[in-house]
Image: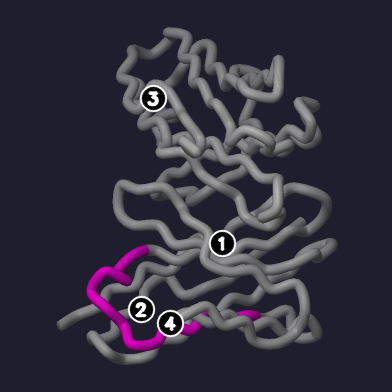
Amino acid sequence: GQSLEQPSEVTAVEGAIVQINCTYQTSGFYGLSWYQQHDGGAPTFLSYNALDGLEETGRFSSFLSRSDSYGYLLLQELQMKDSASYFCAVRPRGNDMRFGAGTRLTVKP
Amino acid sequence: DAGVIQSPRHEVTEMGQEVTLRCKPISGHNSLFWYRQTMMRGLELLIYFNNNVPIDDSGMPEDRFSAKMPNASFSTLKIQPSEPRDSAVYFCASRGGTGRETQYFGPGTRLLVL
């Protein structure tokens, strides 16, 4: 089976940096993705890591360590609009995707 | 591109009724996914199709749920008979094309079974 662990809630202030961790256990592994979901909205893709290392996309970066079955999403220069839920997701095999329970990020002024 | 289209956006029905959710994936995408999201269980993969063929339906909760994809531009998720515990947001997502790792989600159908 597959399991993903991520914190349920994180709070930070505007302008700060926050890191959301994700550990996973899967029977196979193709890559780790991150999605953002605002209240009442649909998940939207943020980033994908198939290889170890850091991927940077603007204010957001994502890191993967395959040997540690661990990854994180780093959000810099936090803005109020970043308040949302963030999901890590793994591709254990083929085309399917399994999502973590999500981390609710609250950005305070 | 219009993105993934789902209908209806909201559905309120009574227990025992049949519910049909519809999805039109992004043109050119060859994988389609149905998810269910609830506060208690999070985002669950119900079933996914590759090139219109169901690949994995292990997430379908029980026989009351069925999904079809008769062609590359249309899929349905049917619940018959519906029960109050089926109340959730149902998302359809598609993947393919140049952004092969990205799943594009539709706006979801908010289902309430009374």
User: In the rendered image of this protein, does residue B21 appear above or below residue B91?
Assistant: above
Element at label 3: helix
The residue identified by callout 4 is: A59
Which quarter of the picture shows residue B86?
top left
Residue B10 percent coordinates (x, y): 32, 25
Observer-nearest residue: A42 or B26?
A: B26
Question: Label 1 vs label 4: CA separation?
Answer: 22 Å
User: In the rendered image of this protein, does residue A107 appear above or below residue A17?
Assistant: above
Amino acid identity at mark 2: Val
Q: Chain of mark 2?
A: A
Q: Do discs 1 and 4 share a chain?
A: yes
Query: Outermost residue toward the front?
Result: B1
Q: Which residues are magenta?
A: A71-84
Question: Label 1 vs label 2: CA separation?
Answer: 15 Å
Element at label 1: loop
Residue A59 percent coordinates (x, y): 43, 82
Question: Label 2 vs label 3: CA separation?
Answer: 32 Å
Q: Are marks 3 and 1 in contact (CB under 8 Å)?
A: no
The residue identified by callout 3 is: B84
Residue B52 percent coordinates (x, y): 76, 26
Q: Earlier in the sequence, mark 4 or mark 2?
A: 2
Q: Are marks 1 and 4 in contact (CB under 8 Å)?
A: no
Disc 3 packing (10 Å; few <14; some 14–19; many ≥20): some
User: In the rendered image of this protein, does residue A41 appear above or below residue B68?
Assistant: below
Q: Is residue B63 left or right of residue A60?
A: right
Check residue A72 for magenta coloring. yes
Q: Earlier in the sequence, mark 1 or mark 4?
A: 4
Q: Are marks 4 and 2 in contact (CB under 8 Å)?
A: no
Q: Chain of mark 3?
A: B
Observer-nearest residue: B103 or B3?
A: B3
The residue identified by callout 1 is: A100
The residue identified by callout 2 is: A10
